[in-house]
Amino acid sequence: MADTRTIVSYGPSPTSSLLMVRLLDFGNPIRGYDHFLNLSTVTRRFGGTIESGELRLVPEGQKTSLKEVGVLTYCSSGTTPDAILQMRASDDSAWLSLGDSTGTISVETDVCRGTGTAWSTTIGTGTGASATYTTPCLATQGRYYVDTTPVTPTITGTNTITLSATLGATVYCYWENEPYVRMKVGDIIETTEGYSRVTSVFDSTTLGLEWYPSTTLVGTHHPAKQLVAGEGETVISANAVLDTLQLRVVVIPRNDPSSCDTVKVLGWVVNHIPAGPRQYKP
């Protein structure tokens, strides 16, 4: 007897990023063979989440200064996943991962670009002639080098300079004030199509990613760390005043057939300095 089934799965290979919705037509006497009909595919890199319950750090009515949070994990053997550690106070709805929020991130189909970002002290490569470079800070605040040689460029705009550098030389900009570099290889850029690992930091406005979305999307930066096989700890610095806390780990499998298949949370670590009760004078 002919029948149909709707199947939702990742495919077509174990490491594919496609979420597939397919219709299986089987037992059809007219066709004479089982047939898959693709109804829809959505590009999406999946990730799992593990959340703590509410952690009360101090007695009710008191506050504490949060300094650092961490999670103790166990991973089975194989290629271990990346992890994002996020937190929020009990009265907050949004999760905080302490990512770089300077400027805006646009993830295109072949590159990740930033506007007003400060992803690196590298701002370009010498052309052998006078060229314009965009600075991640106010141009007047920067200190400029061509390779290891300090140079004095011509400031042509709020965030632009002009200088001549040897062909192929690296042009650097260093600064004292905000913004500061918080991006590194191994971090995660999140879009509506999932999580992509940063594989290269080319300059202050350009990143290379492990994979790119099917269309241009807005990105969000998350500091990340690859978990270790066996027992390990992932820690992020924090700066908040609160009384209760909730933690979440976002586990993102590597694109590898030998990826480990088990991740467990063994415990949470919270370093904080209690502020004590508020004192009132009559």
Image (tube, grey):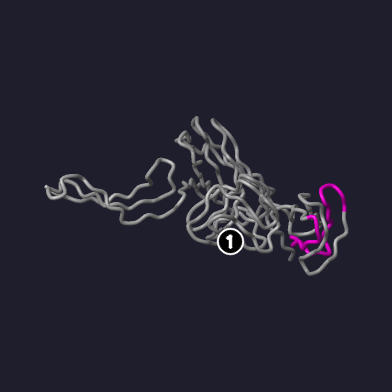
Q: Is residue 217 above or below residue 146?
A: below
User: In x, y percent, where is residue 15?
Assistant: 44, 42
How many C-alpha atoms fall within 10 Å of the one at disc 1: few (<14), some, or many (≥20)? some
Q: Is residue 134 above or below residue 10?
A: below
Q: Quadrant of residue 114?
A: bottom right
Camera sees residue 186: yes
Q: Nearer the viewer, residue 137 or 90?
A: 137
Side of 207 relative to 94 (left or right):
right
Q: Nearer the viewer, residue 169 or 177?
A: 169
Q: Nearer the viewer, residue 99 or 211?
A: 211
Q: Nearer the viewer, residue 175 or 281?
A: 175
- Amino acid of disc 1: Ser
Task: Tell me the residue at 53%/36% (across/down).
Answer: 80
Give the magenta-colored segment's residue range: 128-150
Give the position of the C terminus as an image quadrant. bottom right
The answer to if 89 sits in the magenta stretch is no
The extreme bottom residue here reads 157
Q: Secondary structure at mark 1?
A: strand
The answer to if 131 sits in the magenta stretch is yes
Task: Tell me the residue at 56%/58% (across/down).
Answer: 107
User: In x, y percent, where is residue 113?
Assistant: 62, 59
Camera sees residue 275: no
The residue that mark 1 highlights is 106
User: In x, y percent, where is residue 174?
Assistant: 80, 54
Q: How many marks?
A: 1
Side of 178 relative to 4 (left or right):
right
User: In x, y percent, where is residue 271?
Assistant: 66, 44
